[in-house]
Image: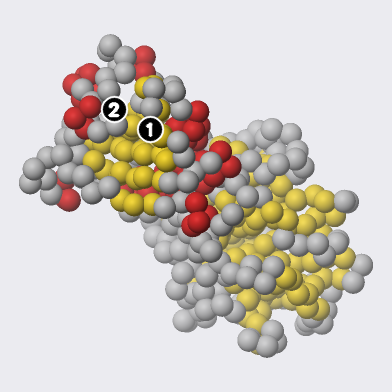
Amino acid sequence: MKLKTWILTCLLVLLFTEGARAGDAMSVDIFGPGQNKVNILVLPARGPGGPGSSALAKNFAETVQSDISYLPFLRLAYMNEILGGDPSKGLKADDIDFKPLQLGRIDLVMTVGAHGQEIEARVYETYTRKLLVGKSYSQVDDSGVALVADRFTAQLMRVLTGKSGFFDSTLAFSKKVNGGKELFTGSALGRGITQITNDGGFNVSPSWSKDGRYVAYTNISDKGHRLGIWDRAKRFSRLRKFGGNVAISPTFAPDGRIAISLSINGHPDIYLLDKDMNPGQPLAPSWAISVSPSFDLSGRKMAFCSGRLGGPQIFLLNRDSGAVERITYEGNYNTRPSLSPDGRFLVFARMTGDGHRIFMRDLVASQERQITFGPGNDEDPSFDPDGYFVSFASSRNGGTKIFVTTRYGDPAKQIPTGAGDAMAPAWGVAPALD
């Protein structure tokens, strides 16, 4: 059943402080220096019979708490931190004694209730009693709880930070299937994992178009290297062969064209394909191998990996001037760059004495820092649509799985992708609901 047929969402406009202004609402600057933790307490879920009397409400509350655990600027508080236990008698502000919450240094409190298949959820500031988020969801069954919880948490993140790219996004990634690799998609929380290719061989290096409709990728089989393009609307892939032996690391530019490394002149250079999939001139020509293009949102900056000065290093092309600047100087093996949408930050994988690790470089401040710390190997970083979260593949828990951190290097969390190795995550915007 399609989502909109069983979720009816309405914003409950409830103000509990007369004359309160919108500017008084709590906000969190996730992009600013330093990350202060905001304490949030989820009160026991209620049903018609009181706390704990609705399995649906309890499931919803637990799922929201799991979602919140991916947001490093929020800290989940526990009921034993509150003097006297549950300070509420219902879901509304008038039903809550805020003083114990204030004494326990709780910044936000969430109430959840359900009656039949209707769920109500609210988040208040404890010091102002102000309602930050209030939502009602109708016709929710057990199979739909996770999606509703994700949408509620996305709204909470939007209210607090102005951004919600983590929840309003899709991951494409490669998984081992029948001795080869196929591509899969799913939400950033691991919901709705779906195999999207069945080409055989090895399908790797996915990249989303800006609008989230297409995924470009490389298919490697006994027919050689081919460019694959999967259409989300048609649920169909097409493959294209180019001259030469190499066609790897395709990437969508913001204007919808594809940049890809081709060996049509004997060695791999990065070319921008026209609307008929014909390559023009190399974007940053060199005698050496150049791969892994990544663009900022304007399309004027392109990061890429090249061996033009020896071992693989990261370079930045200014497409307006044609100037190429070397970005990485530390380490002998730096690969897989990903530019933030604003073009200021770059994440990439570096081979260190402890294995491959993910590093982040501030291109304005010319500062660099390591943001993952193993064990195992960490590779294939990808920025989320907001430029805050970074997904990557890691072997830290055995096999290879997908994890997420932030550009500040917060503790990494694994994204559920099911059985089997998963690698090469690529972040794109989520589709509109049908």
Q: Is residue 186 left or right of residue 33?
A: right
Q: Secondary structure at mark 1?
A: strand
Depth check: give the residue in front, 303 or 9: 9
Tell me which numbered mark, 1 or 2, is placed earlier along the sequence. 2
**Separation of disc 1 and disc 2 at Cα?**
8 Å
Identify the residue at image location x=60%, y=66%: 208
Identify the residue at image location x=37%, y=22%: 50
What is the x, y in percent for residue 160?
31, 46
Depth check: give the residue in front, 15 or 6: 6
Identify the residue at image location x=69%, y=68%: 235
Q: Is residue 163 left or right of residue 62?
A: left
Quadrant assignment, res 268: bottom right
CB under 8 Å between discs 1 and 2: yes
Badge 2 local density, few (<14 within 10 Å), some, or many (20+)? some
The residue labelled by disc 1 is: 113
Depth check: give the residue in front, 342 or 228: 228
What is the x, y in percent for residue 58?
47, 29
Q: Is residue 340 left or right of residue 274?
A: left
The residue labelled by disc 2 is: 90
Identify the residue at image location x=36%, y=39%: 120
Q: Amino acid at mark 2?
A: Gly
Q: Is residue 316 visible?
A: no
Q: Amino acid at mark 1?
A: Gly
Badge 1 local density, few (<14 within 10 Å), some, or many (20+)? many
Q: Secondary structure at mark 2?
A: loop
Q: Is residue 12 visible?
A: yes
